[in-house]
């Protein structure tokens, strides 16, 4: 049985988020920004940004290893790589 990675999200003073993804034998670190209006675009305008970041990382981890996730990016670039992101995100938010 594979254990799921832990996704830890912390808001920084500049408005960005530090994300640590911890698995049994690895840890990755990422800096993520959430552009204004992204929550509304993806149907998650009532969701706190920290939860939007966490759900977005779980979405990404279902599609690629943590080591393949960019070390620094804005959440709006996810659709460049995964066009289904806006439609699928609600499953990861539980909405």
Image: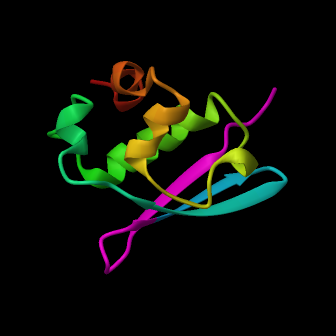
| Highlighted magenta segment, given as a residue range | 1-17
Quadrant of the rendered image containing residue 60? top right
> Residue placed at 41% from the left, 47% from the top?
75
Task: Kindly tell me whether residue 44 is visible in this rendering.
Answer: no
Which image quarter is the C terminus in? top left
Verify whether residue 70 appears in magenta: no
Depth check: 57 or 70 in front?
A: 70
> Residue placed at 79% from the left, 31% from the top?
2
Q: Position of residue 88 (x, y in %)?
A: 41, 20
> Residue placed at 55% from the left, 51% from the top?
7
Depth check: 53 or 74 in front?
A: 74
Q: Is residue 74 left or right of residue 67?
A: left
Q: Is residue 46 left or right of residue 5?
A: left
In the rendered image, the vertical position of residue 53 relative to residue 55, given as above or below: below
Depth check: 3 or 13 in front?
A: 13
Q: Is residue 27 left or right of residue 16?
A: right
Residue positioned most to the front:
80
Quadrant of the rendered image containing residue 32? bottom left
Q: Position of residue 79 (x, y in %)?
A: 44, 32
Depth check: 60 or 8 in front?
A: 60
């Amino acid at each position: 049985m594979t254990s799921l990675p832990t996704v830890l999200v912390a808001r920084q003073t500049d408005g960005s988020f530090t994300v640590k993804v911890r698995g049994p034998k690895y840890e990755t670190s990422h800096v993520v920004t959430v552009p204004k209006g992204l929550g509304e675009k993806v149907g998650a305008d009532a969701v706190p940004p920290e939860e939007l970041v966490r759900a977005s990382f779980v979405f990404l981890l279902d599609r690629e290893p943590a080591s393949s996730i960019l070390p620094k990016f804005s959440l709006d670039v996810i659709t460049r790589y995964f066009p289904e992101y806006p439609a699928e995100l609600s499953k990861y938010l539980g909405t």
